[in-house]
Image: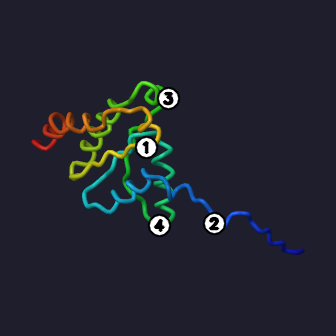
């Protein structure tokens, strides 16, 4: 049995996870106390990064997803983000920071995330903080 080394034409290896901005935002959010991020996008964007972090750090992390499906990718799914924030704050009342991380697919949709955050601050978040 022999071993053969093949020369590659390129000098480096491109790792797509290193260019994934939502992954970087999720990584930053796990370092903040009393913080659970909501990823506004497909569930795969969350599960892949969660698995990557769990394998690397040998620990699990709380990261939520709005689970945008095909219809939301076409027509927008801001209502799912509102529901995700509501459920997250109901299940984890100790949470003080809830970053909303957009993914590549939801950036293309063009939903008004800034407007959603203003709406949440006026309505749902004020209601939840008074309890």
Q: How is the image coloured?
A: rainbow
Label 4 close to label 2 by CB (< 8 Å)? no
Instruction: Give the number of the disc on residue 12.
Output: 2
Q: Residue at x 29, y 43 (%)?
A: 88
Q: Secondary structure at mark 3?
A: helix
* Front label number (2 vs 3): 2
Q: Secondary structure at mark 1?
A: loop
Residue wearing tag 4: 58
Task: Please state the horizontal and vertical placement of residue 78, each as a whole percent of the image.
Answer: 33, 31
Q: Secondary structure at mark 2?
A: loop
Residue wearing tag 1: 103
Label 3 close to label 1 by CB (< 8 Å)? no
The earlier-in-sequence mark between 1 and 4 is: 4
Residue furthest right as drawn: 1
Disc 4 and disc 3: Cα gap in Å?
33 Å
Image quarter of residue 6: bottom right
Disc 3 and disc 1: Cα gap in Å?
14 Å
Task: Please state the horizontal and vertical placement of residue 19, each as a whole percent of the image.
Answer: 50, 55
Q: Secondary structure at mark 4?
A: loop
Disc 1 and disc 2: Cα gap in Å?
26 Å
The earlier-in-sequence mark between 3 and 1 is: 3
Instruction: Give the number of the disc on residue 111.
Output: none
Disc 4 and disc 2: Cα gap in Å?
27 Å
Q: Residue at x 15, y 35 (%)?
A: 122
Disc 2 and disc 3: Cα gap in Å?
35 Å
Q: Residue at x 47, y 67 (%)?
A: 58
* Front label number (4 vs 3): 3
* Front label number (4 vs 2): 2
The earlier-in-sequence mark between 4 and 3 is: 4
Task: Please state the horizontal and vertical placement of residue 53, each as a whole percent of the image.
Answer: 46, 60
């Amino acid at each position: 049995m022999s071993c053969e080394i093949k020369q590659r034409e390129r000098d480096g290896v491109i790792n797509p996870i290193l260019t994934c901005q939502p992954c970087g935002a999720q990584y930053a959010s796990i370092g903040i106390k009393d913080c659970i991020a909501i990823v506004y996008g497909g569930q795969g964007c969350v599960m892949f990064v969660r698995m990557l972090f769990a394998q690397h750090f040998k620990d699990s992390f709380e990261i939520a997803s709005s689970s945008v499906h095909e219809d939301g990718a076409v027509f927008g799914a801001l209502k799912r983000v509102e529901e995700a924030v509501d459920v997250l704050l109901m299940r984890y009342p100790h949470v003080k920071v809830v970053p909303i991380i957009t993914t590549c697919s939801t950036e293309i949709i063009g939903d008004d995330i800034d407007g959603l955050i203003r709406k949440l601050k006026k309505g749902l978040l004020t209601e939840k903080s008074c309890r």
